[in-house]
Image (spheres, grey):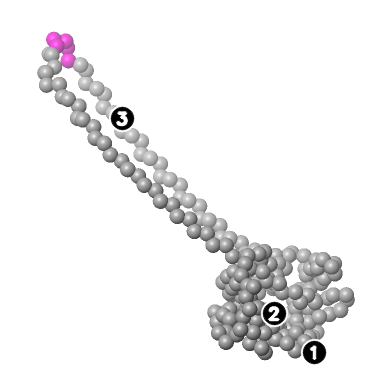
Amino acid sequence: MKKNFKKILAVALAVAFVLSFAACGGSQQPAQQNSAPAQQQNSAPAAPAEPAKPAEPAKPAEPAKPAEPAKPASNGSRLAAFVEKYVIDGNYGIGFDIDGEKTYMAFKDGNSYIDATAEGEQIIMIAKGNEFYMLFPAEKSGIGGTGEGDTEEQDLFVDFSHDDDYTTGEMTIEGKSYYYEEYVEDDGENGTVPVRYCFDGDMLAYIVNYVDEQESFMKVTSFDENVSDSLFEVPSDYEIMMF
């Protein structure tokens, strides 16, 4: 199973100010009128001008065609429906039990929070704006830094929700049957790795990875549709070493 939840932030702020000035002025002298009366001529009066033909009424403009509604970027799968309902706006939190170890990930406004337990040690990673921190709650300490870099999109769901190449089936986990959709991930070192998204109704229940022909289960233990801003704040009583 992949346990590589890399988060490198890329934040760019740009402000452009444009000032424009315009001046106009000047005056024209009125044309001098010729006060001399025009000479009368003995010639016959000119024929009256033909009346102007009335202008043809303008044709009414054709009404603009309404814009076609944007089609959802999905493959019509249950995973795509889950992404469009809960994930696509980038404001959600999800908890996992991974082989008995707890992990919670939250995302909001381009910020990320990961609380993971590995070998009994809790580590919290926060990425906010151009700041990033790794915190050690047991010691109330951590390291942090600022900078810009390549951002790796969280791809637990979104990438596969565009993939039309998937299979479906039923599998039993802990005595309960789940509908699943299986996608194939190119994992580089390990080649192609099947990934199953198992659903209890419309809600995601498990993510099952297959590496070296072994199953690895990520059990969904919680899902939050709204994430608190406080998650992305470093506690004031932590000692942080910046680099």
**Position of the C terminus by quadrant:** bottom right
Main structural element of the magenta stretch: helix, strand or loop?
A: loop
Q: Nearer the viewer, mark 2 or mark 1?
A: 2
66 sits to left or right of 76: left
| Residue 87 visible from this viewpoint | no
> Residue at 58% across / 81% down in the picture?
234
Residue identifier under label 2: 204
User: Where is residue 221 drawn, in percent x and y?
Assistant: 69, 86
User: Where is residue 143 drawn, in percent x and y?
Assistant: 65, 78
**Which comes before the other along the chain, label 2 or label 3?**
3
> Residue at 75% across / 78% down in the picture?
207
**Position of the N terminus by quadrant:** bottom right
Query: Is residue 187 or residue 132 the one in the foreground?
Result: 132
Do callouts 2 and 1 mark residues in contact (Cβ within 8 Å)? no
Query: Is residue 121 or residue 63 the one in the foreground?
Result: 121
- Confirm whether the magenta stretch covers residue 180: no
| Residue 149 visible from this viewpoint | yes
Q: Secondary structure at mark 1?
A: loop
Q: Nearer the viewer, mark 2 or mark 3?
A: 2
Q: Residues within 10 Å of mark 3 (few under 14, many from 20)?
A: few
Picture quarter containing residue 228?
bottom right
Label 2, label 3: how many angstroms apart (C-alpha)?
75 Å
Residue identifier under label 1: 175
* Label number found at residue 53: 3
> What stretch of residues is rendered in magenta?
41-45
Picture quarter containing residue 182?
bottom right
**Which comes before the other along the chain, label 3 or label 1?**
3
Q: Secondary structure at mark 2?
A: strand
